[in-house]
Image (tube, rainbow, N blue to C red):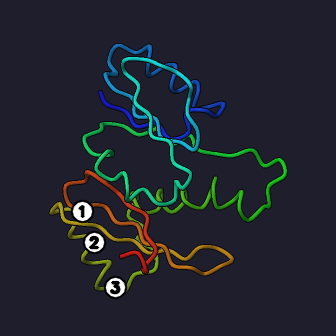
Amino acid sequence: MKVILFGATGMVGQGVLRECLLDRRVETVLAIGRSSTGQHHEKLREIVRGDLLNLTPIEADLRGFDACFYCLGVSSVGMKEDLYRRLTYDLLEFLSRHVSGDWGDLCDDDRRENDLSVMEGFRILSAYRLPRTGVKLWIITEADRSATTFLLPSEY
């Protein structure tokens, strides 16, 4: 099994990383985070990025995995509530809605297209508004299900 792990340096992520590296069924772990784990292991490959809200530059690296553990988070100590919420809650909430078939702020035609896309294996689009700012966020899953991307409409 090939695993992507977001947030391998945090309290939960460290435990997930340890178990993945020990498990003989896991052949590869791709750890993605804001800082390096500092670990060296034959199964482990790391991508360190300051901006985890835009994964487009590493899109090709995210293909071919069987599982994903999302353990990203930050300490709330000294952080403004809006930023803390955005980094730890909002993106995960939108992704959960997307994978469960809640397409967010789409017109009826686009909703029907998504329902068909799920059955036929086409590309899926969801749109949500960020709390407080009202900025629109798109989540797009590719037809072959190899990647899901978070985008602002201006980035499309």
Q: Residues within 10 Å of mark 3 (few under 14, many from 20)?
A: few
Q: In the rendered structure, which amino acid carries the disc numbered 2? A: Asn
Where on the picture, by quarter, is residue 123?
Answer: bottom left
Q: In the rendered structure, which amino acid carries the disc numbered 3? A: Asp
Mark before the other along the chain sequence, 1 or 3? 3
Left or right for 140, reference 54: left
Name the outermost residue toward the left: 120
Contact flag, marks 2 and 1 (Cβ < 8 Å): yes
The residue at which mark 3 appears reads as 108
The residue that appears at 27% across and 45% down in the rendered structure is 63
The residue that appears at 46% across and 60% down in the rendered structure is 54
The residue that appears at 32% across and 45% down in the rendered structure is 61
Q: Secondary structure at mark 2?
A: helix
Contact flag, marks 2 and 3 (Cβ < 8 Å): no
The percent position of residue 92, horizontal first and vertical second, equals 54, 55
The residue at which mark 2 appears reads as 114
Left or right for 80, reference 138: right
Gap between marks 1 and 3 measured at Cα? 15 Å
Nearest the eye: 61 or 124: 61
